[in-house]
Structures are given as C-alpha cells and as structure tokens.
Amino acid sequence: MTTALLVGVGAVGARAARQLIETPGLDRLLIADARPSRAAEVGDAMGDRAEIIDWQPGMGLPDEVDVVACAVPAGDDITIARDAIEAGVSCVSASDDTVTIQQLLELDDAARECGVSIIVGAGLAPGLSDVLVRHARDSFDRIDDVNVARWGAAGAASASTLRVALADRGAELRDGVIGELRKRGGEELVWFPDPVDARACEPVANGLELLSHAAPGLSRASVRYAHAEKPARGWPRRKDPINEWGALRVEVWGVRGSEREPMVFGAIDRTATAAGTVLAVATAGISGVDPHLIRREPGAHGLGGVVEPRAFLAELARRGLKVAIFEGVPVA
Amino acid sequence: MRAFRRGLIVVFVAGIAGMLMRVRGKGGVPPTNGGWRELEAPEFR
C-alpha cells in the first residue's frame, strides 16, 4: 500500500492532488495545509482515498507515509524536506524560489546518508523546462547553450516569487559558473507558442543551478521570466482571471555531427495545472508506483538530473500536458 | 555661435533620419520562420 503526503493545496497543490488521486498504484493521499478550511475543501473533492490530516512542517512525518510532495510558499520546503530525510522518505518540491532551491540542494549529503531522494524544482520552470533540456540532450552529441523562458505564475505564492525574481539583478551561467548580472533589466522579446506569442522577458537566477543537473558541462545558460500582466481595473472584468495561463519556451543549442543547431520546445497550459501535473508525476515516479519515470538515486537532485525524459513526457501528455516543438529556421 | 548652429543642424538632420528609419524600417515581424508542432507520443518512446 503506497501513501503520499501532499503538503499545501493552494493553486499548484490542488491540481497535484487531483493528479495524484488518479494515479494507479497510489492507494492513499494524506493532505495537509496551513489553512484547514482549504485542506477540507480539496480533501472532500478528492473522495474516499484522500484524508485530511492536522500536520505542520517540523512535526515529523506520520508513520505510514511513503513519499512527500510539497506545494508550499517559498521556504517551508526546507523544513518538510528535513522531516522527510529524518523519516527516510523521499520528497518532491515544486518550489521555483532561488534561495529555497539552493537550500534544498544543500541537503544532498544528508539525503545520501539516509538513502532518500529529494527532487528539487518540479514545476513548470524549473521542472518541465529541465525535462525538456534533458530530452533535447538525447538528440545531440553534446549541448552547450540553453535558454529557458517562462510566462505566467501559479497562484499568489508563485506570483510573489516572480516579483522577487524580477526585482533582483538576475544571473547567467557561463562555463559552469553562475554569475550575477551587472544590472537588472535586459528585457528581451521571447516567442512562445500561439496564442501567447511574443512576451518581454527579463533574466532571473531561478532554476539556473538545476539546468546544470539536466545538462552538465553547459557553456552558457539563461532563465528569463516575463512580468505578470496587471488585471484590468475597470468593468467588465475578464471571467477567466488574467495570469492563470502560462507558457514555456526552451531553446537548446547543440552539436550533431559537424552541425551546430537549435532545438526549441514550447508548452502552453494553465500555470498551476502544468506545475501540479509535473509535481504529481514526479511524486509518482519517486514513490515507486511508476518507477520508469525517474531514477531513484539518493541525494538532492534537480528533476532534469534523474528524469527519464521520454517516459516522463509521455506520461504528461497522457494527462493532458502537451509539448510542442518549433519547426523552422530561426531568423536573427 | 557658429558651432552651436552646426550642432543644431546635426541634431535636426539626425532626428529626421531617425524618423525615416522608424517609419520605413521593418517592425512587428516575428523573428522566426516556421511554426509549432505538437509532439506526438511516438517521439517520446
């Protein structure tokens, strides 16, 4: 009997709950949230196999848990991951916050000692972006340049992380070293799949470190986020709240034979749905109910470092999260 | 005074040239030639 503990049922967590409850082989889903009413609402919607528990990070994991999925505001993931390591249980985090990602990766030694896996950055970007980089890596002899761009935020916590990221100076990976940019800004138009099309995106540091897990030895890598659109002030308001939709573009340059060429992937979905689906599939993979999706290696890893990309993308597609590839000639 | 007048003329001519380039220059064209195709399941296997 496999039991998963899902901590946080906000925008991403609620979508992950739906995906987890529909995962064959996952028998029980425990749900915990800082807001009991929200946990109750999601738990009731998930049916008999879901159970709401009164649990806070730092309390130590309940005995019967086999895997933990975190969809919590930046920072809470660290305490939850420590609880998981102490209990000898693997843990997956959807965080896209730079500091949280770094602190989770610092748990590598502790996770190795206890023989558990901590999967870091299982959302849209980082997350699906790293899976696509890993997938592109298989098509080239070697890849040297990766450019990731994301438009959209999944809920209030993600929007807050986005604002912090864009207020910072941003960073770039060059020859394996992440360096902070001299000044913030550096806006660039990025072409996402239709109908999102062109969005101005600025360089950020979020998830840069994880790209080198997906493709070690990169000469250059960048991550760009687009500013969230401000909701209209006047009436009538949009029925579908703005910022719910998100898009991803992953451009990978590599060498195949004697040719250096790009491979461009894109995806469009509701940001929370996409992030929740990636979190759930990664959780299913690391729990062992779907073992061909992720290699279970002790330590703290970016999703791109342990994913089996083809199987993972096929599973995402089966669940409705589809990826597109750009076919054509990029014109400078 | 003569240098000042020359400076004004240079700024004026540069402004006109800039306006012409802005009006006649290319704009609004996506910097790509091609399209997006959804990845199908066989490509994942």
Image (cartoon, rainbow, N blue to C red):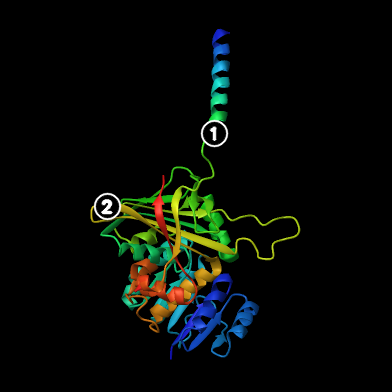
Callout 2: chain? A
Quadrant (top left, top right, bottom left, bottom right) of the C terminus of chain A: top left
Callout 1: chain? B
Q: Residue at x 40, y 50 (%)?
A: A330
* SS at badge 1: helix
The quarter of the picture where residue A1 lies is bottom left
Of A45 and A143, the residue lying toward us: A143
The answer to whether residue A171 is seen in the rendering is: yes
Q: Residue at x 34, y 62 (%)?
A: A136
Q: Could you say where residue A197 lies in the image, as x and y percent from the top left?
A: 53, 55
In screen coordinates, is A135 left or right of A10? left
Q: Residue at x 32, y 73 (%)?
A: A112
From the image, tell me which residue sits under label 1: B24
For the view shown, which residue lies furthest in the right direction?
A235
Identify the disc placed on residue A166: none
Mark 1 nearby-residue class (10 Å; few <14, some 14–19, many ≥20)? few
The quarter of the picture where residue A130 lies is bottom left
Q: Could you say where residue A66 lies in the image, as x and y percent from the top left?
A: 42, 84
Q: Could you say where residue A147 lies in the image, as x and y percent from the top left?
A: 41, 54
* SS at badge 2: strand
**Residue A133, above or below B1:** below
Residue type at numbered disc 2: Glu
Which mark is in front, 2 or 1? 1
Asked if labels 2 and 1 share a chain, the reply is no
For the view shown, which residue lies furthest in the left direction?
A257
The answer to whether residue A126 is seen in the rendering is: no
Residue type at numbered disc 1: Arg
From the image, tell me which residue sits under label 2: A259
